[in-house]
Image (spheres, helix red, strand yellow):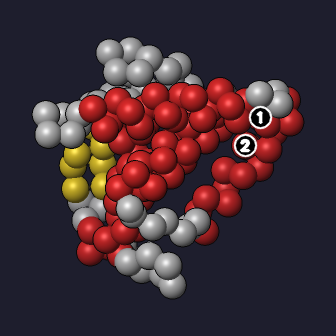
Amino acid sequence: GADVRHGGGQAYYSPASDSVHMPNVERFIGSGTSTPTESYYGVLLHELTHWTKTKERCDRPSPLEFEKEAYAVEELVAELGAAFLCADLGVTQEPRPDHAQYVEHWLTVLKADNRAIFKAAAQASKAAEFLKGRQGV
């Protein structure tokens, strides 16, 4: 049910249009542990996890760009959700170099709240279950 649009050079979820934007699959490269197609689906599942945050889906707060901690939490939820879904679907996923930009923010959140990882994992699990429930719809 997600509106997934292909083209361009960036992957992102747009709350304004309630759509997921993905580069074409040909733009993804493989690695020693994943094919270009697996890399594409790892990113798509990350963005689809963001897509679940709306009130009518999983009802997570939508962080504003300047709210670094809330943004970091949402990115952690999306990464965990993608990891859960990749595992369920048998998609291998190697950490990408661009993930490093989030690590510092995640550490800040995790140091401030030692239960944050559990909260994020619960939200990611809820998002993954929501997406799995939408298969074939």
Image-based side of 7 in relation to 127, left or right: left
Residue extending furthest left?
137
Looking at the rendered structure, the kind of residue marked 2 is Trp
Q: CA distance from mark 1 to mark 2?
A: 5 Å
The residue labelled by disc 1 is 109
**Rendered image: mark on residue 106:** 2
Looking at the rendered structure, the kind of residue marked 1 is Val
Image-based side of 110 in relation to 23, left or right: right
Q: Residue at x 73, y 43 (%)?
A: 105
- The reply to whether dot 1 and dot 2 touch (C-beta < 8 Å) is yes
Q: Within the image, what quadrant is residue 24 found in?
A: bottom left
Across and down, in percent, residue 8 comes to 29, 60
Q: Within the image, what quadrant is residue 122 found in?
A: top right
Instruction: Classify 38 as above or below 17.
Output: below
Q: Residue at x 83, y 31 (%)?
A: 114
Instruction: Classify 13 as above or below 45.
Output: above
Q: Is residue 90 visible?
A: yes
